[in-house]
Image: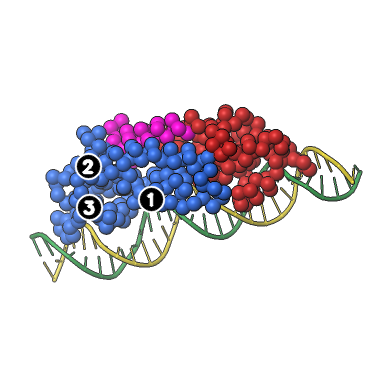
Chain colours: A red, B blue, C yellow, D green
Amino acid sequence: MLSKKTKYALHALTYLSKHKEKGAILIQEISQEYGISHKFLENILLELKKAGFLGSKKGKGGGYYLIKEAKDVPLSTVIRMLDGPIALLPCVSLNYYEPCEECHDQATCGLNKVMAQVRDETLKILSMKSLQDIVQEEW
Amino acid sequence: MLSKKTKYALHALTYLSKHKEKGAILIQEISQEYGISHKFLENILLELKKAGFLGSKKGKGGGYYLIKEAKDVPLSTVIRMLDGPIALLPCVSLNYYEPCEECHDQATCGLNKVMAQVRDETLKILSMKSLQDIVQEEW
DNA sequence: ATTTAGTCTATATATTTGATAGGTTTTGTA
DNA sequence: TACAAAACCTATCAAATATATAGACTAAAT
């Protein structure tokens, strides 16, 4: 399951994308919209900023805004950044690979094969779908 | 990611299936084979027994053995039993459904749609593939 | 009777997740 | 230029979950 962190991030990004015309948007506004703790969301938005998805402005009239085009924000990227691996096993993770300690030989492991297949199908969707698809779906 | 518990369970089931001709197999033997803590594996096998996958025999010459046919043990069932939901969001889980607290309206939620798609593709594989497929893959 | 090996329940330890606290910096504006 | 607003930053805490361990109990073989 996705962590709340990631879910909140995706909702926040969606909100920012939908209200792009408003310019900078307060953390407050987003946290109220979804009933998320202000401080928790703060941390999340900061991370998204450091990762280059968001820009921000301090002081009065400040807030956050989307830097990237919604179509250039694949869901897989957001999920990986905040939750880590998408794969079900470390030994089939493309971005967070680690061998399984208990595994004798990855090359012949049956689970490895199946989970690689699951990973491929999941990624086919999550890297194809972008923030824009979410926004469009909701409008 | 799958928990160690689930990974261990799947390995243990595979082992039991491969060595079915031996009859009852010691926890000891399996835990050594994969370098798993004896006691931890004990708990896992007990769960699998209570769920009706394994049988056991106490005392000397005892151990665990597979009750079901390997082909009748879908990976999805094992994963769900030990790890819970396969879906990435509670609101698209078929077996552990819960609404997302922060969500205004599931019917129009864009994430919901995408994650339902991911769930479908994942389940297509995990409920199609059984223990037997894992065993065959490794032989 | 003794040994072997699973059963059961409880507890301990570690890790991760979700949330909070409070001071710092920047910026608009009165 | 002082003040207020709002993001920035770091640290910490609390709760939940995952992993592992302990030890007494029961059943079976010999």
Q: Is residue B136 visible?
A: yes
In the rendered image, residue A41, in percent from the top left (x then y), is placed at: 62, 46
Which amino acid type is marked by label 2? Lys
C-alpha distance separating marks 1 and 2: 22 Å
Which amino acid type is marked by label 1? Asn
Mark 3 and mark 1 in contact (Cβ < 8 Å)?
no
In the rendered image, residue B59, in percent from the top left (x then y), is placed at: 17, 60
Whether residue B37 sits left or right of residue B29 in the image: it is right
Q: Which residues are magenta?
A: A102-126
Q: Which mark is residue B71?
A: 2
Residue B10, placed above or below residue A68: below
C-alpha distance separating marks 3 and 2: 14 Å
Query: How would you rate the neighbour count of disc 1 (Cα within 10 Å): few for under 14, some for 14-19, many for 20 or more?
Result: few
In the rendered image, residue A26, in percent from the top left (x then y), is placed at: 70, 44
Which amino acid type is marked by label 3? Leu
Residue A120 is covered by the magenta coloring: yes
| Residue at image point 65% right, 50% down | A32
| Residue at image point 28% right, 32% down | A108
